Amino acid sequence: MNLGLYLHIPYCLHKCGYCDFNSHPENQEESIRYVDALLKELRAYSSKKYTVPTVFLGGGTPTTLLPSQLKQILDTVQQSFNLTPDCEITIEANPATLKLQALQEIRAAGYNRISIGVQSFDEKELKLLERVHNQEEIHSTIQQARLAKFENLSMDLMFALPDQTIEKWCSHLKQAINKNPDHLSTYNLTIEPSTAFFKLHKKGKLCLPHEDIQLEMYKTTIQTLENAGYQQYEISNFSKPGMESQHNINYWNNGEYLGVGAGASSYLNGERFKNTNLPSNYIREIGVKKNAIETRERLEPIQAMGETLMLGLRLLKGISIDVFENRFEVSFQKVYGKVLEPLLNQELITFNQNRIALSRKGLFLADSVILKFIS
Ligand code: SF4
């Protein structure tokens, strides 16, 4: 059985103003104990009955750890699970945290894909987002990652930033394309409760582009990246042919995954479970009982079907009806026939060759279309 493996490193140099991820200020003393706990949790899950085609070290900022710690983590993963020979092993990285030697050591440890949090090429925007890196560090990190032989390089970019114009966003896209990444993720800024941006936004201090402009930015993104040879394969993700993120595709296919580390979620044997968020609590729980699971939920079939659609419709190729029906042992038409009809009439979805997918029109209204299948 295949299993994606996610490992969470919760430390960052600074909490960005918009961030609602489970990230905490870097703490060297605690991070040593955190890595020990992570290794312990990994060993507790150790099983050769699963085949692991993807490993993803995310955060937070995993590259706040030393290359030797990152190697120790991957060594333990390899000892604990059966990794496929071509296993995709991704590490997320922030430009301000990496130099050539560290990149070379990380690559030599076995990480073969790097996802760099660029977000913007503009100094003013980087400051506004409270990113700790600058433009110069973006250029040198990308160049050095290639020198370190990362042949699979992804970049994250954000659009619809306060006061951002379409022209400014286009210039970022062009700079990104000039760096020749294999993969690009582009997300519009969303204001999440409990972030510093939320408070600023409430006080009227952040002026986000109007939603029509945001839609225009999104359409421009698709056009610009497609013209440059990138294929859109998910709502926010683009890649050169064959360079899609296999780890994320497994999520969108609602496949099984194991999450290890503070706040990490898992989906295994029809059950969702999630670890406690706070690193200090996580370390304590692992020390006492070798797991830090805080919540568990077994999904009812109708919930699991809804989630499969919610996730799978994010993929441009959508969902195979055969796979869906075999998995849930139901007739798709019987469960969703009533929802399908109006969406087909409005040309928001396509339903052919035994697949259901969002149409181009539906892609721009994805959230509301997907909601129809889960409400
Ligand atoms: S670097 Fe990423 S995870 Fe860390 S605070 Fe910023 S947005 Fe959050």
Image (cartoon, rainbow, N blue to C red):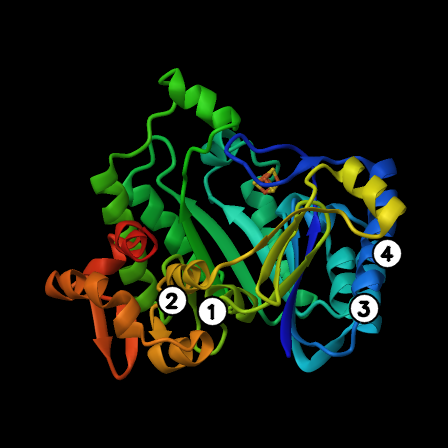
**Front residue (pair 92, 40):** 40
On the image, numbered disc 3 is attached to which residue? 46
Q: Specify the amino acid type for callout 1.
A: Asn
Report the front residue among 175 and 314. 314
| Kind of element beneath mark 4 | helix
In what element is the residue under mark 3? loop
Q: Position of residue 231 (x, y in %)?
A: 37, 70
Question: Which tag is nearer the camera, tag 3 or tag 2?
Answer: 3
The answer to whether residue 71 shows anywhere in this view is: no
User: What is the CA distance from the residue labelled 3 to the residue labelled 4?
Assistant: 10 Å
Mark 1, Cα crowd under 10 Å, few <14 / some 14-19 / many 20+, is: some
Q: Are marks 1 and 3 in contact (CB under 8 Å)?
A: no
Measure the C-alpha gap from mark 3 to mark 2: 31 Å
Q: Nearer the viewer's eye, disc 2 or disc 4?
A: 4
Q: Indicate which disc, 3 or 4, sits on the residue closer to the N terminus.
A: 4
Q: Is mark 4 within 8 Å of ligand 1?
A: no
Q: Compared with residue 245, is residue 195 higher up or lower down, i.e. above or below? A: above
- Earlier sequence position, callout 1 versus callout 3: 3
Q: Residues within 10 Å of mark 4 (few under 14, many from 20)?
A: some
**Disc number for residue 315:** 2
Asked whether the residues under the numbered discs 2 and 1 touch, taking CB atoms below 8 Å apart as contact, a structural biologist would say yes
In primary-sequence order, the first of circles 2 and 1 is 1
Q: Provide the secondary structure element on which disc 1 rests.
A: loop
Q: Label 4 vs label 1: CA separation?
A: 29 Å
Q: Position of residue 30 (x, y in %)?
A: 84, 38
N-term mark: 3 or 2: 3
Q: Which residue is mark 1?
A: 253
